[in-house]
Image (tube, rainbow, N blue to C red):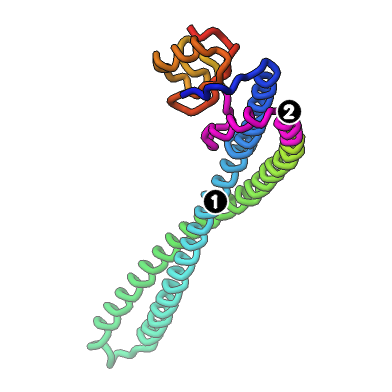
Amino acid sequence: MSAKGTLLSERQIEVLLGISELSTKAHRNNLRLSQGPEASDYRDRAQEYKRTKVKLEAANEEARNLEAERESLERELSSYEFQLRTSRDRLDHSTGSDYKSLPALRAEIAALEGKVSQYTEEEIGVIDQLETVTKQRDALEVDLKRQLQEALAAKEALEQLRRDISVVDESLQAEMAGLKSQLDPEVAALLERVPTQLIDKVAHVLDQSCSGCRLRISSILLDQIKRFPSDAHYCEECGRLLLPNGPQAG
């Protein structure tokens, strides 16, 4: 696609290249805010903090469940211990006339001793688990505090970068405005025809391809560029303004 009749002087081409270069610099600065090492570092540390927080919440929940289980076992154990003491007292104070009930009483004591032993072992097992989970929870709390500080430091570094880039961007925008004021109205209108999503709005023909999108230019457009080298032309693929008098279109 060509803009016949719109001729570009060397000065106007120089201004267009300057505007495109400044636009690219501003775009790269903005990309650094979202994709640069500072942004990646903050995202990584924030995600690490969130993962550890989830682990800590799970450890706290497990500790609460274990503590509830321990308390339940302790109540059961206390009940069986009380029953065992009562049964033993009955056995200790039994007389010869109670001989018929002694076997049943001894069996009851044996069963209660089994229950006390069982619940004691279970409580000890839960206490051991609780101790392990508590240690894990304490370690996670230490990690979480450290990761929070690191995440906050990374965030501050990213915010400082944002402030620095904002200052640079203001300077770039002012410089671009100065260059745009040097464009002839018809040349400025050429830029308006380039798709707005393109940051670098100008390109050259390089090895029969657009230096912007790297796609091959049709033979028809190449012929027009050769026939009218001073005219403004547009890449048929990306829509960038193909500047004349750049690298040879061959």
Is residue 37 shown to the viewer in this render? Answer: no
- Vertical placement of residue 238 versus 220, above or below: below
Tell whether position 34 is magenta.
no
Q: Which mark is residue 134?
A: none
Provide residue 21's location: percent of width, then percent of height: 65, 25
**Start-end of magenta stretch:** 173-202
- Residue at x 39% of width, y 13% of height: 219
Q: Element at badge 2?
A: loop
Closer to the camera in the image, 70 or 211: 211
- Residue at x 60% of width, y 19% of height: 7
Q: Element at badge 1?
A: helix
**Residue type, mark 2 in image:** Gln
Provide residue 10's location: percent of width, then percent of height: 67, 15
Closer to the camera in the image, 208 or 107: 208
- Quadrant of the image occupied by residue 30: top right
Residue under label 1: 50
Residue under label 2: 182
Is residue 90 shown to the viewer in this render? Answer: yes
Q: Are marks 2 and 1 in contact (CB under 8 Å)?
A: no
